[in-house]
Image (cartoon, rainbow, N blue to C red):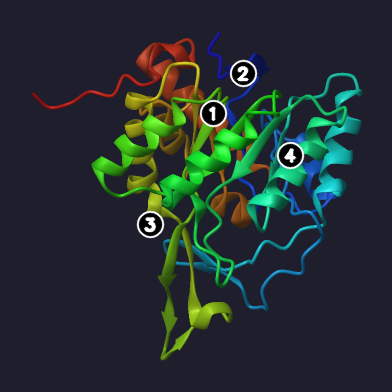
Amino acid sequence: MVSTQTTIAGFTFTNCLMNAAGVFCMTKEELEAVEQSAAGSFVTKTGTLAARQGNPEPRYVDTELGSINSMGLPNLGVDYYLDYVTELQYKENTKPHFLSLVGMSPDETHTILKKVMDSDYNGLVELNLSCPNVPGKPQIAYDFETTNQILSEVFRYYTKPLGIKLPPYFDIVHFDQAAEIFNQYPLAFVNCVNSVGNGLVIQDETVVIKPKNGFGGIGGDYIKPTALANVHAFYQRLKPEIKIIGTGGVKTGRDAFEHILCGASMVQIGTALHQEGPEIFERITNELKDIMTEKGYQSLDDFRGKLNYIN
């Protein structure tokens, strides 16, 4: 039997596919739709200390090759999501889940993480170091000194499974520098990548989204090569216990296969999930299994990270 089962930080997932934070995860109803689908898990909307309305609309637009968005972290507040994933822990036949969170400042990040630390939630947490769409706020993960400082402070008190969501890096030396930092800490995973920040899409003579004069994060087909490069670069550089979640440009089983081939243990779907709905998980799972069967692979371990190079 071909299996797409996978493991991160001691948690076993029956399927390696799940949603990306920001898609089908704002409300309990949306999360429940992913929970009841073929997905192996879900991640919540990135929660901040207080609920946020986010940026003015239009702030998300589907495009020919994907999407552009400048959402501005709209969410119902971390307590809403923390309470829900904690409640699910005690239900029978539930899946392991990911709680996504971010602080609007380092102090707020610590406040939120200490709240999770003091809670009954024992699942995975994804700390978003890569939100590119909050006006006036840079992406933390591009500031290596600040990233190192935050992780150093966090792991003085946080002992539950924790990973980080990363923006795309574009320079080999940045892969080296980032990995050197991440390898110092007991991270459960890194998630590569968030949207490519500050793209611009134009229709006729006008930008298509309102915030930031049209500048927004690019997702979908546009970013798959960048996502694959980041997945593979960190797979090569990080210690084996830090797993990779691959995110970016996944809309077919072949796309998911390539992420795993580059080293991903799980694969998240964003733009295509927004466009197709949770039934996408069954379609892509079947397509992935068909590829595995054709190639004689029984499990993800048979080909994970085994990307071939040209001699």
User: Label 3 neighbourhood size at 10 Å, few (<14), some (14-19), many (20+)?
Assistant: some
* Amino acid type for the residue under numbered disc 3: Tyr
Q: Residue 9 shows which numbered tag? A: 2
Q: Position of residue 82 (x, y in %)?
A: 83, 40
Name the residue beneath numbered marker 4. 113
Q: Nearer the viewer, mark 3 or mark 2?
A: 2
Say if 144 sits above or below 3 in the image: below
Q: Amino acid at mark 1?
A: Phe
Mark 4 or mark 3: which comes first in sequence? 4
Q: Which residue does the numbered mark 3 point to in the structure image? A: 222
What secondary structure is found at the residue carrying circle 4? helix
- Does label 1 or label 4 sit earlier along the sequence? 4
Residue that extends furthest to the bottom in the rendered view of this protein: 205
- Which corner quadrant holds the N terminus? top right
Q: Earlier in the sequence, mark 4 or mark 2?
A: 2
Residue type at mark 4 is: Leu
Which residue: 81% across, 59% down? 50
Q: Which residue is mark 1?
A: 189
Measuring from the top left, give residue 33's x and y in whole percent. Answer: 78, 43
Q: CA distance from mark 4 to mark 3?
A: 33 Å
Please report contact status of discs 1 and 2: CB closer than 8 Å, yes or no: yes
Question: Helix or strand or loop: what does disc 3 sit on?
Answer: helix
Along the line of sight, which residue is nearer the eye, 128 or 19? Answer: 128
Res 277 visible: no
**Looking at this view, is 53 or 162 the one in front?**
162
* Camera-side mark, 1 or 4: 4
Indicate the position of residue 76 as horizontal and vertical percent values: 82, 57
Mark 4 closeness class: few <14, some 14–19, many ≥20 residues within 10 Å: many
Question: In the image, what residue occupies the spot 83% across and 35% down?
Answer: 85
Residue type highlighted by circle 2: Ala
